Image: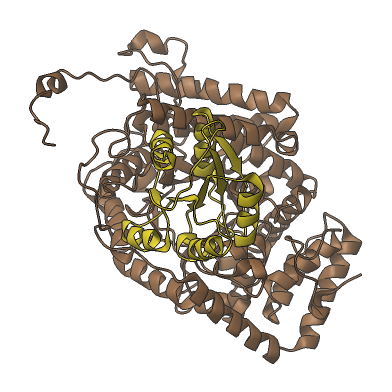
C-alpha cells in the first residue's frame, strides 16, 4: 500500500524537541543562565584543567601532551586469527592494542570441558595455555606496545601470568611492560559469570594482581574498573558511576588489608566507562566523576599523591545504543559518542564497529571505527584545547546535577552496607533489573525515540548486512583448540606441571586469602599448566569444587586433598 | 502458521524463554520475559547455560506453546538447529519457535528452513513479539 510521503510533512516541519530530561531522567529547563552557577565556586568546582579536583581534566594541556589512546576491542577465533587482526589494526593506525578473552577463558574452563563445546573463540580469544598467548602476541613488541587485556573474571591473574611469562621468555624486563588488565572480577557477576566468581576468590585474585604489579610492573594499570558493562545492563549515568566507584572502593579496601599504602597503588587504577548516546549527560557524567573521585581519594583514603587522585578512564562507546536495523546508522551514533568522550577528556577511546549488534566486527567495519577516531583526533580540532565546554552554563550546571545524583546513589549503596552487601543481598541485581525494564518501557511507549527501532523504520526489510558478516566457527575452533590441548598435555613435562600446581596449592592453602600467588601462577603457566587446571587448583585450595560447573572431576595432575 | 498447535483459549499463552550455551548477554531475554508477562502471557525464563535437553524438558514440563531462544554469541547456528531436531524427535514440532538476539539477516532463511517461525534481531519493541505470538497461535 503506497503511503503519500507528503501527507504529514507540514506536521513534521513543525515537530518539536519533546525530551525534557536527560537520558537518565534528570529534568532539564529550556536554557541555563549565569545565576544557575551561583552556588558553584570556580576554584572548587571547575578550576583550570590539571588542578584538584580535576573536573576539567587531569592534565593542564590534555591532548597537546598526549592524544587519547585509540584502541579497538579485538579477539576471536583461533589464536592466529586474533594475531592477524592485531596486525590489521596496527596497520590501520591504532595507538594501543587490546584483546578480549572468550567465555570459556572467563569461566576458567579448558576447551575440553563439556560446557566449552562450540564456545571457543566465538566471543573473544581463547587463552588455555601460555602457547595461546605466544601465538596471539607473535610479532607484537611487548616492550613498547601498550596492551590492554580485557579479562575481568577471577581468571585475570592467570592471563596476566601468561603475558608476563611470554615477556620473560623473550628476555624482556617486565618492569618495562605497559598496559592494563581489567581485573574487575565482581562486576562479571552481573554479566552472567556468576559461577566463576565466588566473591572472596574474586577479591583475592584482584588484590594479588594489584600487589604484584605494584612491586614488579610499575607502568601497568592493575585494574580497570568496568563501569561500562554495568551501564550496558541498563543503569543510569549516575548509577554507572556510583556502582563503579563503590566497586572500586571495595577493591581498594581489600588491597589496603594487604598492608599497601594508598599512594602505592592508587595511581595505577583506571576506569572503563560507557559513552552513551545522550551527548551532554555523558560529558557531564565524566566531569562529575573526576571531581568526585579526587575527593574520595583525598578525603576517604587520605591519598596525598595527586596521581592517586586523578580519575583516569577509557570510554567504550555504548554497544547497547546501537541498533541492528539500518546498521550504517550506527556509524553516526558511534561518532557522536566518541566526540562526547573526547570533549570529556578521556584517556582512551574504543569505538564500537557499526555491525556489533549483529556479530563480531568485520575487518572493514573495524577499520571504519578506527578512522572515526582519526577524523575526530586530527580533523575536527576538538583535541586542541582542554575541556572546551568548561564554563558553559548548561555544562557546569549539569555536571553539578550529576555529581549530586551520583552522591545520592552512592549514599544508597552505603546505606545498605556497601558494595559487598549490595552484591551479597542481591540488591544490585534488582537495581539492574528494574533499570532495564524501565528503559525497555520507554522504548515500548515510544517515549524514547530510537531511529530504525521504534521510529523511522524502513519499509523494506534489509536482506544483507552492508559490509558483510564476520563468521566465527565456534565448533571448529573448539575442535582445533582441543586437539592442541591434547598435544600439549602429551608433550609437556608432567612432573614439572604437577610440582608447580602443588606449590600453588600449598601456598594458597597454608597462606590464606592474603598470600600472593602471582609468582606461582607465572611458574605454572610457564610449564604449560592449563587455565582450567590452575583455576581448579586455586579453587580447591580455598574450599571450592574443582570445576565451577560441578561437571568435571579434577585430573590426577591437579587433584589435591 | 502451519504446524503450530491448537490451543484452548481458556488458559494464557505459555512461553519458555531460554539462553543456551555460555552466552551471558541476558539483558534482552529479561526484558522480553518481563514485557511478555505484562502482555498477559505466562513466561518461564530458564536463565543462562541451558542445554538442548534442558530446554526440551522445560518445554514438556511447562506444556509451553512458545519456545524463545535468545542468542548473542552465535548459538543460533549451533544450538538452535540441534534444539529443533530434538523437538521434532520429541513430537514438539507443533510449538512456535522464536529466536532473538544478535542474528545477521543473512541467517534468517537458514533458521526458517530449520523450522524457526520468527526471528527478532536486535532490540525490538516486545509488543512486536507479543503480536507475532498471538497472530501465529490463533488457529
Snapshot quadrant of residue A548: bottom right
Count the labels in the image.
Answer: 0
Camera-side residue of A17 and A434 = A434
The residue shown at (73%, 50%) is A203
Camera-side residue of A545 and A389 = A545
Quarter of the image with the C terminus of chain A in it: bottom right
In this image, A287 relative to A193: left or right?
Answer: left
* Chain the render paints brown: A
* Chain the render paints yellow: B
Compared with residue A474, is residue A212 higher up or lower down, i.e. above or below? Answer: above
The colour scheme used here is: by chain
In this image, A325 relative to B25: left or right?
Answer: left
Q: Where is residue A221 drawn, in percent x and y?
A: 58, 54
Q: Where is residue A207 drawn, in percent x and y?
A: 72, 53
Q: Where is residue B81 drawn, in percent x and y?
A: 48, 64
The residue shown at (35%, 32%) is A279
Quarter of the image with the N terminus of chain A in it: top left
Camera-side residue of A314 and A383 = A314
Q: Is residue A51 visible?
A: yes
Compared with residue B106, is residue A450 higher up or lower down, i.e. above or below? Answer: above
The residue shown at (85%, 63%) is A541
Snapshot quadrant of residue B53: bottom right
Compared with residue A141, is residue A356 higher up or lower down, i.e. above or below? Answer: above
Q: Where is residue A278 drawn, in percent x and y?
A: 37, 31
As drawn, the residue found furthest toward the bottom would be: A491
The residue shown at (40%, 29%) is A444
Amino acid at each position: 500500500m503506497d503511503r503519500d510521503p507528503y501527507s504529514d510533512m507540514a506536521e513534521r516541519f513543525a515537530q518539536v524537541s519533546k525530551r525534557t530530561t536527560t537520558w537518565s531522567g534528570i529534568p532539564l529547563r529550556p536554557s541555563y543562565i549565569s545565576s544557575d552557577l551561583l552556588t558553584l565556586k570556580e576554584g572548587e568546582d571547575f578550576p583550570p584543567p590539571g588542578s584538584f579536583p580535576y573536573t576539567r581534566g587531569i592534565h593542564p594541556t590534555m591532548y597537546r601532551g598526549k592524544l587519547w589512546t585509540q584502541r579497538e576491542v579485538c579477539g576471536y577465533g583461533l589464536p592466529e586469527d586474533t594475531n592477524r587482526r592485531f596486525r590489521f589494526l596496527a596497520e590501520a593506525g591504532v595507538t594501543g592494542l587490546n584483546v578480549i578473552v572468550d567465555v570459556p577463558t572467563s569461566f576458567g574452563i579448558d576447551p575440553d570441558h563439556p560446557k566449552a563445546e562450540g564456545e571457543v573463540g566465538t566471543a573473544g580469544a581463547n587463552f588455555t595455555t601460555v602457547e595461546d598467548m605466544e601465538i596471539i602476541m607473535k610479532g607484537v613488541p611487548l616492550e613498547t606496545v601498550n596492551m590492554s587485556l580485557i579479562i575481568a573474571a577471577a581468571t585475570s591473574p592467570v592471563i596476566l601470568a601468561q603475558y608476563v611469562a611470554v615477556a620473560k621468555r623473550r628476555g624482556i624486563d617486565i618492569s618495562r611492560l605497559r598496559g592494563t588488565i581489567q581485573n574487575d572480577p565482581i562486576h562479571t557477576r552481573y554479566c552472567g559469570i556468576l559461577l566463576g566468581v565466588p566473591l572472596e576468590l574474586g577479591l583475592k585474585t584482584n588484590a594479588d594482581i594489584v600487589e604484584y604489579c605494584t612491586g614488579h610492573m610499575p607502568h601497568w594499570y592493575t585494574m580497570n574498573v568496568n563501569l561500562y558493562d554495568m551501564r550496558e545492563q541498563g543503569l543510569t549515568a549516575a548509577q554507572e558511576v556510583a556502582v563503579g566507584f563503590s566497586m572500586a572502593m571495595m577493591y581498594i579496601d581489600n588491597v589496603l588489608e594487604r598492608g599497601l599504602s594508598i599512594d602505592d597503588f592508587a595511581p595505577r587504577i583506571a576506569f572503563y566507562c560507557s559513552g552513551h548516546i545522550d551527548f551532554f549527560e555523558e560529558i557531564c557524567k565524566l566531569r562529575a566523576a573526576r571531581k568526585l573521585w579526587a575527593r574520595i581519594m583525598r578525603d576517604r583514603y587520605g591519598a596525598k599523591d595527586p596521581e592517586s587522585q586523578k580519575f583516569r578512564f577509557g570510554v567504550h562507546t555504548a554497544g547497547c545504543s546501537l541498533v541492528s536495523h539500518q546498521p550504517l546508522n550506527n556509524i553516526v551514533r558511534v561518532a557522536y559518542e566518541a566526540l562526547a568522550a573526547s570533549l570529556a577528556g578521556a584517556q582512551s577511546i574504543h569505538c564500537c564497529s557499526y555491525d556489533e549488534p549483529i556479530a563480531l566486527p568485520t575487518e572493514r567495519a573495524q577499520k571504519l571505527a578506527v578512522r572515526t577516531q582519526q577524523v575526530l583526533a586530527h580533523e575536527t580540532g576538538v583535541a586542541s584545547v582542554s575541556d572546551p565546554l568548561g564554563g558553559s552554563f548548561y555544562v557546569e550546571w549539569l555536571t553539578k546535577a550529576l555529581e549530586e545524583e551520583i552522591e545520592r546513589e552512592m549514599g544508597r549503596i552505603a546505606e545498605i552496607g556497601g558494595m559487598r552487601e549490595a552484591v551479597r543481598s542481591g540488591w544490585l541485581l534488582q537495581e539492574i533489573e528494574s533499570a532495564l525494564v524501565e528503559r525497555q518501557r520507554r522504548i515500548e511507549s515510544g517515549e524514547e525515540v530510537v531511529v530504525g527501532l521504534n521510529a523511522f523504520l524502513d519499509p523494506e526489510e534489509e536482506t544483507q548486512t552492508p559490509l558483510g558478516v564476520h563468521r566465527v566457527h565456534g565448533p571448529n575452533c573448539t575442535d582445533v583448540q582441543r586437539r592442541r590441548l591434547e598435544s600439549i598435555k602429551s608433550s609437556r613435562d608432567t612432573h614439572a606441571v604437577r610440582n608447580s600446581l602443588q606449590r600453588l596449592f600449598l601456598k594458597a592453602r597454608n597462606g590464606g586469602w592474603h598470600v600472593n600467588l602471582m609468582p606461582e601462577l607465572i611458574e605454572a603457566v610457564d610449564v604449560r599448566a592449563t587455565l582450567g587446571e590452575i583455576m581448579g587448583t586455586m579453587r580447591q585450595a580455598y574450599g571450592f569444587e574443582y570445576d565451577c560447573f560441578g561437571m568435571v572431576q579434577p585430573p590426577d595432575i591437579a587433584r589435591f586433598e | 502458521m502451519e504446524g503450530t498447535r491448537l490451543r484452548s483459549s481458556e488458559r494464557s499463552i505459555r512461553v519458555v524463554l531460554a539462553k543456551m550455551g555460555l552466552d551471558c548477554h541476558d539483558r534482552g531475554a529479561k526484558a522480553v520475559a518481563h514485557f511478555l508477562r505484562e502482555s498477559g502471557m505466562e513466561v518461564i525464563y530458564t536463565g543462562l547455560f541451558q542445554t538442548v535437553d534442558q530446554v526440551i524438558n522445560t518445554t514438556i514440563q511447562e506444556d509451553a506453546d512458545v519456545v524463545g531462544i535468545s542468542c548473542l554469541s552465535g548459538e543460533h547456528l549451533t544450538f538452535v538447529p540441534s534444539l529443533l531436531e530434538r523437538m521434532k524427535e520429541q513430537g514438539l514440532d507443533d510449538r512456535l519457535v522464536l529466536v532473538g538476539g544478535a542474528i545477521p539477516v543473512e541467517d534468517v532463511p537458514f533458521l526458517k528452513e530449520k523450522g524457526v517461525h520468527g526471528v527478532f534481531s536486535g532490540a525490538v519493541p516486545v509488543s512486536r513479539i507479543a503480536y507475532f505470538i498471538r497472530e501465529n497461535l490463533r488457529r
